Amino acid sequence: MRVIASLAALPRLLALTLCLFGAQSLASYASVPDGTVLLSSDNTNRYLVAGGARFFIPSTQWSLYSGANLVVMSQSAIDAITQIPQDGTLLREHGYAAIYVVVGGTIWWIPSPTELDHWDDWKTINNVPRQWETAFQDYSVQVLVRERTGTQVYVWIAGAKFAITNASDLAYYGGEPNVKTVPLGTLASYTSEPFCGVSLRERSSSTVYYLGYHAYAPTTLRKYAALWAADGVVPDGALASFPVTTGEPACIW
């Protein structure tokens, strides 16, 4: 059973603010420099600090950071550090070439060396442990974005982009001041089909839809009227292309 988010009881403005920006504005960043490895005094856990955030290091990867400065902290103190780096942080998984920049609480691929020139911070790229993407798999993270040098604004949530086509929608999501700039070309890898398992509603509707698949049609994303709170809000009409199903769909069979 899903738990209805406590945001439902908060004023609409606060709920929308947290929806758009997540918990990053309330985050506690590490007080040690990036590249430091935190060692828990309560167990054997180790974490890399990058962009002020903590990244868990599996024991099989400890050797990758053997030369890093080690700081011992209690597990509770480590847990209080955010898992979402500060905007502008550059990340690359150990052993891979792809570089990402953190913007709006999520990660955006930098598609070319030319584009990287507009995002680097003295070429400081944080090489993070493998399986690092887990911290960014939060369906409630919703952000207004526009590609650098672009004009089209989108609201992004759960791996999907929804075009903002009128001033009313833009104002609803906070207006131009809330639009974040992302790398040129990075939005090409996204469509208007979100990840399976997200719950969304259109902004002028109270109906929340859970999006998923049926085993008999595993390639067609369908919407199912849900009885729980939405992970996010999309522009009116954004969910029209998804067929309605009366049987609750799933993501795993």
Image: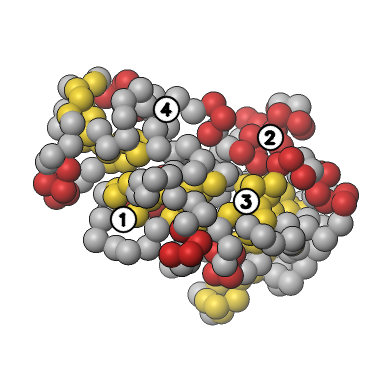
Residue appearing at x 26%, y 55% in the figure: 94
Percent of width and height locating residue 57: 23, 43
Closer to the N terminus: mark 3 or mark 2?
2
Residue linked to disc 3: 181
Marks 3/1: CA distance?
23 Å
**Mark 3: few, some, or many residues within 10 Å (few <14, many ≥20)?**
some
Percent of width and height locating residue 174: 77, 40
Front residue of this view, candidates 196 and 238: 238
Residue appearing at x 61%, y 38% in the figure: 21
The kind of residue tagged 3 is Thr
Residue linked to disc 1: 93
Closer to the N terminus: mark 4 or mark 3?
4
Residue appearing at x 24%, y 21% in the figure: 73
Q: Quadrant of residue 193?
A: bottom right
Secondary structure found at label 2: helix
Marks 3/2: CA distance?
18 Å
Q: Is residue 59 above or below residue 152?
A: above
Residue linked to disc 2: 17
**Mark 1: few, some, or many residues within 10 Å (few <14, many ≥20)?**
some
Closer to the N terminus: mark 4 or mark 1?
4
Q: Is residue 39 above or below residue 165?
A: above
Marks 4/3: CA distance?
22 Å
Percent of width and height locating residue 245: 68, 68
Residue appearing at x 41%, y 48% in the figure: 90
Nearer mark to the viewer, of 3 and 2: 3
Residue linked to disc 4: 29
The kind of residue tagged 1 is Glu
Q: How many numbered circles are shown?
A: 4
Q: Quadrant of residue 253?
A: bottom left
